[in-house]
Amino acid sequence: MRFIKLIIVCIFGIISLSATAQMAEPKWVRHIPKSTSETFYYRVTYGDGKNYDAAYSKAFARAIYENACKRGIYVDVNTSIEDIEADITKQVNVDNRSMNLYINKVCEYRDEQPNGRIKLYILWQIGVFGKSDPNFEPYEDCDKL
């Protein structure tokens, strides 16, 4: 009987710790802000990896994926930022100066896991396809829980 009570207490402890961890993340991680402009929209991307650079590369790839797909560009989220930029350049047969994928990093939230891996959430402003100047606006609520 004591063993069952101990298990129940442990389960409630794990649930409460999980809820506390979710409450500590910024609001934008689960609730994407609405843009006040028609020239850009917000997108939250997620990346994970053994270190910050690996997690950031995945989050970055996911951020450009949606915009790039509209232009017929394939993006692999498991490659480095340099390789992504090289692939985009090669696929559209242009140099980076004439490439217009407007992406603005706004906020980031890092969650370091007990196993040493990093989960990285990034809030981006992404220019609407076909707009020449997305007119990005400041976002003040990066730390709002």
Image (cartoon, helix red, strand yellow):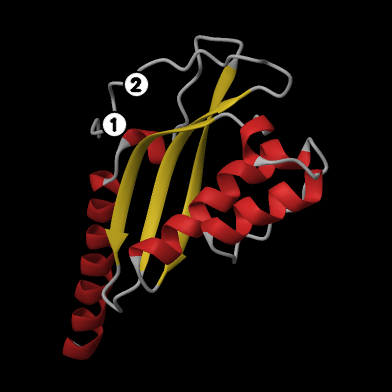
Give the camera-side residue of 44 and 31: 44
As drawn, is 99 to the left or to the right of 115? right
Q: Which residue is mark 1?
A: 142
Q: Which residue is mark 2?
A: 139
Quarter location, residue 55: bottom left
The N terminus lies in quadrant: bottom left
Contact, mark 2 vs mark 1 (Cβ under 8 Å): yes
Q: Residue at x 61, y 42 (%)?
A: 64
Q: What is the crowding at mark 2: few (fewer than 14 residues within 10 Å), some, or many (at least 20)?
A: few
Q: Residue at x 61, y 10 (%)?
A: 38
Give the camera-side residue of 9 and 96: 96
Q: Is 79 rendered above or below residue 44?
A: below
What x and y, as percent, mark residue 65?
66, 46
Quarter location, residue 53: bottom left
Q: Residue at x 29, y 45 (%)?
A: 25
What x and y, as percent, mark residue 71?
79, 36
What x and y, as percent, mark residue 92?
79, 43
At label 1, the amino acid type is Cys
At label 2, the amino acid type is Tyr
Give the camera-side residue of 33 and 71: 71
Which residue of the protein is positioned furthest toward the right in this rendering?
72
Residue 30 in view of the camera: no
Q: Judging from the image, what secondary structure is the residue with disc 1 in? A: loop
Distance from disc 2 to disc 1, alpha carbons, whole Å, reads 7 Å
